[in-house]
Image (spheres, helix red, strand yellow):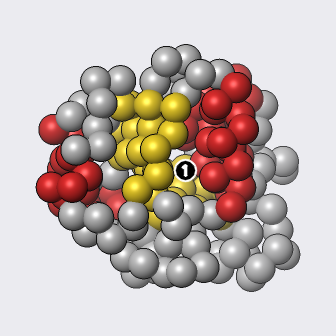
Amino acid sequence: CVVASGVAAINAAMLAFLKAGDHVLVSDGVYGPTRSFCDIFLKRFQVETTYYDPCISAEDLQLLFRPNTKVLFMESPSSLTFELHDFAALASEAHKKGAAVIADNTYGPLRFRPLQHGANVSINAGTKYISGHSDAMIGLIACDRGSYRRIKRQVAALGCPASP
């Protein structure tokens, strides 16, 4: 899906998998607006967020899952601090627990393909590398077949497709 911005891509992807009473695990190194979305918007709708160290091991991550954990959100490399996740291992743990894996791949679009390493959804803020730093506002959401309809429905419900 092509949406209005990278932030719209992040928000639509998360909302496609979360509802009131759910829990989401989010890398502590995420983009500031992602943190704000979790801390303000999701909290308002009773979705609890736990932040984890981007360098966490799969064994330690599994201890953070709860029965209501629905999403593992990774940003690798992390915004500003550029830590790299053990992506495949963390994604594997999430899938064992029945959680979807969403990846903000804004800093790695030419070097890393999250869907090939266990992500269900890969997001890219095209505003950055793809279009040349704010020359255009656009967000991209790539996903596996099992996630496509829920992502597409959420984008339509939020009214955040990109303008022509």
Side of 87 relative to 15 (left or right): left
What's the residue at 21%, 34% (across, down)? 97
> Where 131 sits versus 29, above or below?
below
- Residue 108 visible, this orientation: no
Q: Position of residue 92 (x, y in %)?
A: 18, 50
> Where 78 sits versus 66, above or below?
below
Side of 20 relative to 99 (left or right): right
| Viewer-proximal residue among 50 and 151 | 50
| Viewer-proximal residue among 62 and 16 | 62
Quarter residue 113 falls in:
bottom left
Side of 51 relative to 93 (left or right): right
Give the residue number, with chain letter if any, for mark 1: 141
**Type of residue at label 1?**
Ile
Question: Could you classify mark 1 by the number of other residues whose Cα lies within 10 Å: few (under 14), some (14-19), or many (20 or more)?
Answer: many
Q: Position of residue 71 (x, y in %)?
A: 40, 38
What's the residue at 15%, 55% (across, down)? 59
Q: Position of residue 94 (x, y in %)?
A: 25, 43
- Residue 125 visible, this orientation: yes
